[in-house]
Image: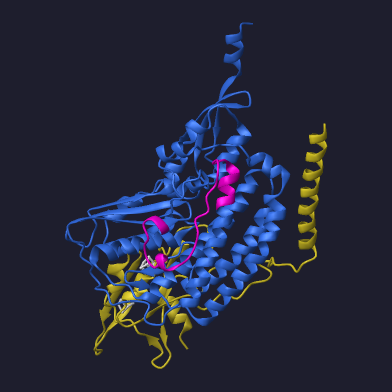
Chain colours: A blue, B yellow
Amino acid sequence: MLESEYQEQNRFFLNMGPQHPSTHGVLLIVLEMEGEYVLDPQPVLGFIHRMHEKMGESRPCQGFMPNTARMDYVCALPYNHGYVSLIERKAGIEVPKRAEYIRVITSELNRVASHLLWLGAYLLDLGAFTPILYGFDDREHILDILERITGSRLTYCYYRFGGVYKDVDDKFIEATRAFIKRMRKRYVIYEKLVTKNIIFIKRAENIGIVSPDMALRYGMTGPNLRGSGIAYDVRKNEPYSVYPEFDFEIPVGEQGDCLDRYMVRVQEIEQSLRIIEQALDRLPDGPVRSKVKKNIKLTPGDCNFAVEAARGELSYYLVGDGTSTPYRLKVRVPSYSNLSCLPELGRGILLPDLVSILGSFDLVIPEMDR
Amino acid sequence: MKQYFSELYTGGKSLVEGLGVTMKALFSPIVTVQYPREEIDITPNYRGHIDLILDTGKNTYLCISCGMCEKSCPSDCIKVKGKKMEGEKKKSLVLFDLDFTKCSLCGTCVEVCPKDALEYSQEYNLAAFTKEAFHFDILKRLEERRI
Ligand code: SF4
Ligand code: SF4
C-alpha cells in the first residue's frame, strides 16, 4: 500500500456536537482527523439562533431587557448592566449612587457564580467529576442570595433604566458577607482538589498556547486574553459605573496556555470578592431608582457601551431614530471572538487536548448564537 | 529515572491530598435536598407567573381593565377584556388570560399597572405535556381564592 493511500484511509471527519457534552451547548465542530490528531477543526454555529438583535429592533427599548439575560444565562447581570447603561447614556438618565453600588455588587456576585460554574464544567470536560459538586455547592449560595432580591435564579431581569428593581436589605448584606467568608475558606479545597492535581496540570499545562499576538488578532477579550499576559479589562481600561472607586487588580497569565486561563479565573474570584467587600462597606443610602419617563425617546445618532462580562468585553451598539424603538441594536459578545481562534489553535493537536482548550475558553453558546 | 520517581511522588501526593478533601466532605453534613420528598421554602420575593391581587376588603380584584399590562408586555402574552355591567360604574373583568409559554417574567406588567393590581405568584412546580396547560386563566385563579 502506498503511503498516500494509507493516509487517505486514516483521514476521516468527525462531528463533535451539537450534542456533545464538552461543547457546552449546541455548538458543532467539524473535525478533520487523522487518527487521534485533529487536522482542521471548524466550528459551525447557528443551532440556537433566536434573533435577539432583531427582537431588540422591533419593540420599544424597555422590552429588550429580559432578552439580555437570555443571551448569556450563566452571567446575566453584566448583560443587564450593559443594556441599561447603554440606554441611560443615550437618553441621559441619572442613576442614584446606591443603585450603581448594588449593580456592582450583584454583577460581581454573578461573575463569581459564573467562574465557579466554569471551573466545575471545565474539570468535568477533563474527566474529573468531583470539583463540579463543590463548585455548585458554592454557587448555590450566590444563587440563593441573588434569588432573594432579584426574584429569579438564572435569567435575571433586575436592573431598570435609572436604577434597580428592588432595594437590597440587611439580610442581603449579611448573607453576602457570610458568603465571602465561606468562599475564602474554600480556596484551600480547590487548590488541593484541582490546582495541585497532577492529572489536571498535565492536561492543562502547555496545552493550547495562545500568543499575545494571536489573541489580539482574533479580538479575544476577558480571562482568555489576560491569560496570554495582556492586562486588558474594561473595568479598568474604560471604567464604567462606580468601578473606579474600588481597589482591585487584574490577574494576568504568562504564556497563555489552558493552565494560565484557569489561574486567571481563579484569581479573579478573589478580586471580585474584594470589590464586593469594598462596595458593601461603602454602600451609600438613598433611592435606588430615579424617575424615568415611561416612553423613552432614543435621539437620532449612535451610542455604544461596553462592560466586562465574565467571558470578556460585551458591548452594545445602538442607533436611534427619534422613536422609542432602536433603529439598530448590535451586540458584540466575547465568546464569539474567543472561539474564532480555534481553527488556528487546534491544528495538529490531539483530540483530548482540543476538549481541554474548548473547556478553558469558557464558551457559552447561546451568547454567540444570539 | 530520578525525575520519574520524583514525579511519581509529587503526583501521588497530590492525588492523596485530593482524596483527603473528598474524605472530609464524606463526613460533613449533607447539603443536598431530596426534592420532591423534601422542599425548601422559597423566598417571598420569588417571581413566578403573574396573578391578580385579591383585595380582601372588597373580596375582589383591583384591576380596572385598562389594558396597560397588555400593551406593555414585550412578549404579548396577556389578554385583558373588561365589560361595563349594567348598573355599575366601573368596568368589570371578563377575561384575564396569560400565555405563560411566552412570558419571560420580566415584570413589566406588574410595574406599569396603575392600580398595582398584579403580583407574582409563588408557583414553580410547573410541568405539563401540552402548550395549552400553560395558558392560565388568571381570573379563574382569583375566583378560587375568593372567600
Ligand atoms: S412578566 Fe413580562 S413577559 Fe410576562 S406577562 Fe408580564 S410583561 Fe409579559
Ligand atoms: S394594567 Fe393593571 S389595572 Fe390595567 S388591565 Fe392590567 S392588571 Fe388591570
Segment colored magenta: A236-264
Tell me if I can see residue B17 in this picture. yes
B138 vs A359: above or below: below
Q: Residue furthest top?
A: A1
Q: Residue furthest bottom?
A: B57
Image coordinates for residue B32, horizontal then vertical, percent: 69, 65
Q: Is residue B144 left or right of residue A120?
A: left
Image coordinates for residue A153, horizontal then vertical, percent: 52, 65
Q: Is residue B27 left or right of residue B135?
A: right
Q: A285 and A342: which one is in front?
A: A285
Name the residue rendered at 51%, 38% in the picture: A210
Image coordinates for residue B53, horizontal then vertical, percent: 41, 82
Q: Quadrant of the N terminus of chain A?
A: top right
Tell me the quarter of the picture where residue B68 sits: bottom left
The number of numbered badges drawn on the structure is 0
Name the residue rendered at 20%, 65% in the picture: A297
A302 is within the stretch colored magenta:
no
Q: Is residue B6 left or right of residue A49?
A: right
A252 is within the stretch colored magenta:
yes
Name the residue rendered at 45%, 60% in the picture: A76
Q: Is residue A335 left or right of residue B69?
A: right
Q: A164 and A283: which one is in front?
A: A283
Image coordinates for residue B142, horizontal then vertical, percent: 43, 80
Q: A9 and A133: which one is in front?
A: A133
View quadrant of ligand 2 = bottom left
